[in-house]
Amino acid sequence: MTAASLARAEPQWGPAQAGALNDRYSGRALDALADTLTDPAFGATALVSSFGADSAVLLHLAAQIRCDTPILFVETGWLFPETLRYAEDLSHHLGLTDVRWLSPLQATLDEKDPKRLRWSYDPDGCCDIRKVEPLDRALTGFDLWISGRKSHQNRARAQLSLFEPQGTRLKLNPLHNWSADQLRAYAAQHKLPPHPLVADGYPSIGCSPCTSRVQPGEDPRAGRWRGWDKSECGIHVPSEPGNDPVF
């Protein structure tokens, strides 16, 4: 079966195609990554990166295939200064030539977060205007996007599959079954520079007001939105029909 044999009647992906691709690429996640970046049958493809704690591994893998892979990076206005420097330094280190820095619309911020305090009383709404909406705009024209999510990160991600449909697009999670040890070993083997905050107790790094240090034995994402019933920003939604978005 080739990617072309999964041709769609409309310019949309869905559960049937995702299931067929999961069967085709079972045990071959890196082949799936290579094919989605090089085979025109998959359509226009982008990689979405937070330039966070584990981002270097996926970005390095993609750079070895296509250094001009479109990389979408949402600069929410609340990221740590260390993350912004790391995004610049890592992009240069890997030779990435098409890193697109995305920002929320100023008019939206003026209307919905004029005092820059929305994170403190409505983190879902803050994520929506500062992260989800800018990425949605940037994904216009792309048929497939690549995510760095891993199953070990928290319970909400435990059942990740390699391919999943999201709306009219397809999402690829090439590292979905990589363990933390595998990620560390790959980074060490390829001498990938770490995010500077990892050594300071931040195994998962988002916006500065909503990210705290993680204690030994805690879930790696326990420091994200600590104290709130929230574990995702809203970019990632479940692939099963009828479920609510994951925030």
Image: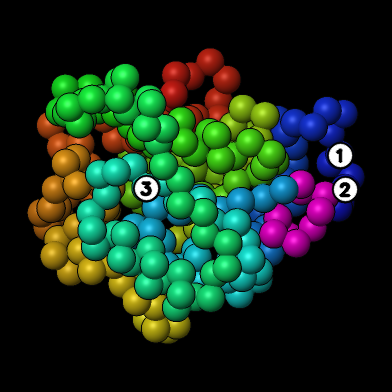
What percent of the width, then of the height, locates residue 203?
24, 58
In this rendering, the answer to whether 60 lies above or below 105 is below
Q: Amino acid at mark 3?
A: Glu
Of labels 3 and 2, earlier in sequence is 2
Q: What kind of secondary structure does the magenta stretch mostly adopt? A: helix
Say which quarter of the image contains residue 199: bottom left
Q: Which residue is mark 3?
A: 75
Compared across the picture, whether 233 is left or right of 93 comes to left
Q: Is residue 61 visible?
A: no
Find numbered disc 3 in the image and state the secondary structure of the residue it sits on: loop
The mark found on residue 4 in the picture is: 2
Compared across the picture, whether 45 is left or right of 242 comes to right
What percent of the width, then of the height, locates residue 243?
48, 19
Q: Is residue 217 magenta?
A: no
- Quadrant position of the C terminus in the picture: top left
What percent of the width, then of the height, locates residue 76?
34, 42
**Marks 1 and 2 close (CB-CB < 8 Å):** yes
Q: Which range is magenta?
A: 35-43
Q: Amino acid at mark 1?
A: Ala
Q: Which residue is mark 1?
A: 7
User: Looking at the image, which residue is at 79% across and 32% down?
Assistant: 11
Q: Label 3 neighbourhood size at 10 Å, few (<14), some (14-19), many (20+)?
A: many
User: Looking at the image, which residue is at 38% across and 63% down?
Assistant: 87
Q: Is residue 36 magenta?
A: yes
Find numbered disc 2 in the image and state the secondary structure of the residue it sits on: helix
The mark found on residue 182 in the picture is: none
User: Looking at the image, which residue is at 53% across and 33% down?
Assistant: 136
Q: Amino acid at mark 2?
A: Ala
User: Looking at the image, which residue is at 20% across and 36% down?
Assistant: 225
Q: Is residue 196 visible?
A: yes
Q: Residue furthest top?
A: 242
Alpha carbon of mark 1 to alpha carbon of mark 3: how far?
35 Å
